[in-house]
Amino acid sequence: MLKIGLEKNCKYNCHGGTNQHWKIQKDDDDTYSFINVHTRRWIDVMDGYFSIGAELQQWEWNGSDAQKFYVRGVSKMDPNILNNCKVA
């Protein structure tokens, strides 16, 4: 499980495997989706409620706001990624 929020939490060190590769897809509504190259599943905000520390999961595509993100670049090395889910 990935977590977002004030602290960065990752279960595994980067090793370059396809399970750590993501395809970024720009959707028709100017949002972005992130698809795992290995599993072909999308990043999804668990239960559709976004808050600091919200859990992310990989899930089949369902087109909900839990799988759509706005990318607002602060810089190429430090993007700001936002989601349109309900705030818990």
Image (cartoon, grey):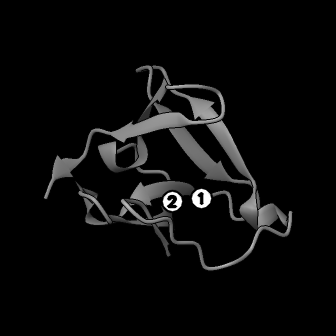
Residue at the (51%, 55%) spot, across then down: 43
Quarter of the image holding residue 55?
bottom left
At mark 1, the secondary structure is loop
Q: Are marks 1 and 2 in contact (CB under 8 Å)?
A: yes
Q: Which is more toward the observer, 12 or 44?
A: 12
Q: Is 27 positioned to the left or the right of 29 in the image?
A: right
Image coordinates of residue 74 in percent, x first then y, are 50, 26
Q: Position of residue 1 (x, y in %)?
A: 50, 76
How far is the residue under mark 1 from the one under mark 2?
A: 5 Å
The answer to which quarter of the image holds residue 38 is bottom right
Residue in the image at 31% along x and 43% along y: 65
Q: Residue at x 54, y 54 (%)?
A: 42
Residue under label 1, please give it.
Answer: 41
Q: How many marks?
A: 2
Mark 2 highlights which residue?
60
| N-terminal-most mark, 1 or 2 | 1
Task: Please identify the residue farthest to the bottom as the structure is shown.
Answer: 11
